[in-house]
Image (tube, rainbow, N blue to C red):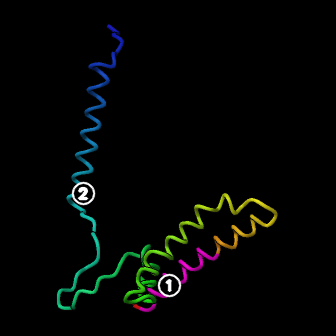
């Protein structure tokens, strides 16, 4: 007797069985091979906080504007960079608009890369 299989309960039971087997396999592998999370901590040295790589340019700006000038390095310069990116569609209009946007984008990218490299090389 060839009976046609319905989604419920025939296929649903098969799909749930496969899902549970895959979840069991993933949990077993996660418990057998745990990932290394974060950096190794040496408790004999004093704590020296350092941000992740994508904030190193801002960390370097803080070094250039110490004391009461810190607001320039942490607020005004990053806001100016974001403002330039927001104004790209309006700068792009005109005869030399594309060139201005290209120059602004390259300058922003190079400044981020430069400040990040300086922060990495000079801890």
Residue farthest to the right? 95
Identify which residue is drawn at 43% across, 92% down: 122
78, 33: nearer the viewer? 78
Residue 119 occupies quadrant: bottom left
Q: Is 115 inside the magenta-drawn segment? A: yes
Crowding near pointer 1: few (<14 within 10 Å), some, many (20+)?
some
Q: Is 36 inside the magenta-drawn segment? A: no
**For the residues marked 1 and 2, what is the alpha-carbon distance in whole angstroms?**
35 Å
The percent position of residue 29, horizontal first and vertical second, equals 25, 56
Q: Quadrant of the N terminus?
A: top left
Q: Nearer the viewer, mark 1 or mark 2?
A: 1
Residue farthest to the top? 1
* Left or right relative to 50: residue 113: right
User: What is the secondary structure assignment of the residue under circle 2?
Assistant: helix
Total marks in image = 2
- 11 over 87 or under it: above or below: above
86, 17: nearer the viewer? 86
Residue occupied by mark 2: 30
User: What is the secondary structure assignment of the residue under circle 1?
Assistant: helix
What segment is highlighted magenta in the picture? 107-122
Residue occupied by mark 1: 117
């Amino acid at each position: 007797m060839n009976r046609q299989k319905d989604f419920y309960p025939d296929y649903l039971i098969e799909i749930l069985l496969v899902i549970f087997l895959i979840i069991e396999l993933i949990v077993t592998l996660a418990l057998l091979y745990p990932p290394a999370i974060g950096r190794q901590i040496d408790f004999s040295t004093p704590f020296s906080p350092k941000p992740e790589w994508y904030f190193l340019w801002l960390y370097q700006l803080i070094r250039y504007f110490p004391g009461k000038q810190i607001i320039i390095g942490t607020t005004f310069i990053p806001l100016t960079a974001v403002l330039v990116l927001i104004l790209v569609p309006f700068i792009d209009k005109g005869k030399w608009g594309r060139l201005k946007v290209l120059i602004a984008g390259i300058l922003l990218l190079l400044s981020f890369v430069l400040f990040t490299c300086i922060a990495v090389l000079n801890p």
